[in-house]
Structures are given as C-alpha cells and as structure tokens.
Amino acid sequence: MNWLKNKNKKHVLLISPNQKNAVTSNDAVFPFPFLSLPLIAAEIPPGYSVQIIDERITRASGKEKADIVFITSLTTTAYRTYELADIFRSRGIPVVLGGVHVSILVDEASMHATSVVVGEAEGLIKPLLSDFESNDLKPVYKAASQISLDTIPFPELQLLNWRHRFFMSPIQTGRGCAYNCDFCLVPNISGRKLRLKSIETVEKELNHLSSFKSHRLFVVDDNFLMKKERAVSIMNLFQKYGYQWMGFSNLSISKDDSFLKKLQDSGCISLFIGFESLNAEDYLLKNQSYGTVDSMREAVSRIHAHGIGIQGSFIFGFDTDTVNVFQETAAFIQETGIELPHISILTPFPGTPLFDTMEKENRILHRDWSKYDLSHVVFQPKNMTVEELQQGYSWALKYLASPTSIFSRLKNRPGFSFHFLISNFSLHRSQTRLACSLWNPAVQQSFQERNLCLC
C-alpha cells in the first residue's frame, strides 16, 4: 500500500469501525463504497501518508502504525469506535472522532477522544493537523459555516479496498435536505438548505472517476433529482462519459413522463426510493402526496414502465402500524415487483425529533447503541408488542430474501433483471442469517395461527 512506502512521513490512520460479530442485513462481499473517509483523506496535506481501514473488510487490531488516528462513527458502531479510540490513546496516539453519532453526543464521545469533530469535517482537517503538529489539539472542532462543495477535493477512492470499487463508484453532487422527517438526521448534519456542486465541478469529478475504470455510479445525494433542470444537465454528463447510474429519489418523479424518459435515456439502472410506510404519512414529508397504497402502486408502475428498477425502503414500527403491516408490506413488494427491497425497524436515533418525542413519552427501552442498527427494537411500539415488531421484521426479512420470493418479483422485470438478481443473492445469506439469529419460534407460530404471514 502507498502509505507503507512513505516511512519518513507521519502516518494518518482512518478507520470505519464495525461492531465485532455484528450480524447485519447488508453484509455483502462487495460493500457499498463510502465517501466519508476518502473525503477526509483528500483534505490531508502531502506531508502525511494515509491508510484507510474499513472493518467490514479488514479488522483493525489497535497495533497499527499511526501518528494520529481518525475514526468515524455511526450510532450502532459507537462502542467499537470507543474501544478502538481507547486502545490507540493508551499507546499515546491522539484520536480524532467524527461522524453522526459523536456530532450529536459530544460529551459522551469526548470521554474517549483527544478531539471531536462536530458536523462536516471538510475545511477542518488542515487546521486540526496544524494543531497536532504544535501539540495543541483542541477538544472540539466545528466549522463556523458550511463549506462550498466546489472547494472540496475529490475523494481519494484509490485508498479503499478494491472490493468497494468492483461494481460502482460513488459521487456526490449536493448536500442537505429541506424535508424534516422525524426519524432522519440528515438536516441536523448537512443542513436544510440544499448545497450544490457546480456542473463544471461535477464534470471534472466524472473525468477523474473515469481513471477507476468503473462504468457505474451511485449518486449519494439525498435529493439529486429535486432540481430537474440541473439533474438533466448532470445526466447528460453521465451519457457523455458512458456511465450507468443509480441514486436516491422519491415518488414524485413518477408524475413526469418526460423526466422519466430522460432518466431512462441517461442510463439510470435504478432509484433508491424511501416508501418508508404504506400508512404513516404523518411521519414523512418526502412522499406526502402518495397517501394510499393504490397511489404508490401506480407510481411504481409508471417508473417501471420506463425500464427503471426500484430499490425500495420500508420501515416497520410507526405508531399507525399493527401486526398486519408485515404481511401487507411484503405483499405490496411482491405484487409491484420492487426489485430490491430494504426493510428496517423504526429507530429513534439520538438527535432526531423521533428520539426526543419517544424520550418524553418514556418509550425508549435502553441506550445500548449497538442495538440501534435498524434491525432491533429499541422503543415501545404503540399498537403491538416489542416482540411482535421484532418477529414481524424477522419474518419479512427472511421471506423477502428467499429464492422463491426473489425469482417471483423479478420474473416479469426486463432490462436489468440480471443485475438485480445478483444484488438480491449477494444479500441473501446475510439477510437470512440475521433473520434466523432473531427468530422466536413461539411468536412465529402465533403469527401463522393468526394468518399474519404469507406462509
């Protein structure tokens, strides 16, 4: 690796932790490429060598050579983050923590860190390293204002393991979200104002990405298609550089056939769409105009009619949900042929309006952050028991990951069916393993007796 060749330079170690022996629903052989650490790496001056460790692929031992360590944390990986931080600090190595979880719970993180970066790290890395060189690291670093995306260097994706880059490259053209869904942290971290890269910067980055010889992109923006005229300009660039692409969207695009045709012509393989719930519109803002199952079904049909696949996100556990929600949601996914379903349990992450509301209502069951992984129930549901929510999710996960279900929903899908077949089966093992690890035979038998599953 490049960092090993620079023995005279100070070593910066960047770590994305993963809880030991964690069983997750998205544990794939080729993990989704991520941008957080490659973006930090791009901010580090030439006088340093840099190494990235993603524990989904390579486990950190704590014995790695480093002069300073940066660790990014999600809520579910907080304990592993703190464990690693404590190990490196015990060796006298300064540790900088960042990411969503520590940005919200700064006092908790500070007990394990030399410094905590709150919010976005771009623009803070060089002054932080200057303080490191002067042996004067501050306890907390927070930008006075949000940085222009045109000033951020391109991410150092070559530092990622080849398995991250085997299928696709990530690109970000904008940040921020004007919506305020109760369970989402994006507005807290990236702001409610949409910040955009210029079209010129996007083209330069696409040219840069072409060196990685990947012909597929994932646009990680939460709202890439919100400004249609701009999105069309960027999609024209995707065509120019010969990329197929995937990205996030909401159901509103289904109303515009000409825009859907442009998506199709630009090489759009699929869109990740947050359906979230078939009946909990009070919690959601992105799809409020689709308050009925029939309207959602029609929207899916219009998107599919243009040869665009759907990765559909569904959440169980809203206050409007009863034990019928699992069967109803699974049936909807199968009937509409949503190619790659992503299901999860409603999780009140610290810093969200949902957490604040449930804390006031004394519905938070515990603060074992390792269970805040979208697969475990950490709050008291309103219209079912904790175990019914847990087991309903487990059943739906296992059912949708079964080969029979996969082939059934893909059999009538032309175009990229092979891509989705591979995608589904790459997750089949981890999803089935997770479902089985959570399985409670007594509750599952009760579901069958009440005809609450598609057995």
Image (cartoon, grey):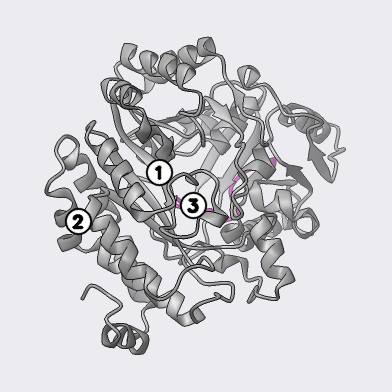
> Which percent across, then down, holds residue 379?
59, 73
Instruction: Provide the residue span drawn in magenta.
Output: 56-68
Question: Quarter holding the C terminus?
Answer: bottom left
Q: How many discs appear?
A: 3
Badge 3 amino acid: Glu
> Which percent across, then down, holds residue 220?
47, 34
Q: Residue at x 59, y 31 (%)?
A: 175
| Neighbourhood count class around disc 1 (C-alpha, 10 Å): few under 14, some 14–19, many 20 upward | many
Badge 2 amino acid: Ile
Q: Main secondary structure of the magenta part?
A: loop
Residue 273 numbered tag: 1
Instruction: Mark yes or no: residue 7 visible.
Output: no
How far separated are the C-alphas under marks 2 and 3? 29 Å
Check contact, mark 2 vs mark 1: CB within 8 A.
Answer: no
Residue linked to disc 3: 55
Q: Nearer the viewer, residue 322 or 381?
A: 322
Q: Residue at x 51, y 33 (%)?
A: 223
Residue 406 numbered tag: 2
Q: Disc 2 or 1, which lies upstream in sequence?
A: 1
Q: Disc 2 or 3, which lies upstream in sequence?
A: 3
Badge 1 amino acid: Ile
Q: Disc 1 or 3, which lies upstream in sequence?
A: 3
In what element is the residue under mark 1?
strand
> Which percent across, then down, holds residue 157?
47, 30
In what element is the residue under mark 2?
helix
Q: Residue at x 29, y 63 (%)?
A: 330
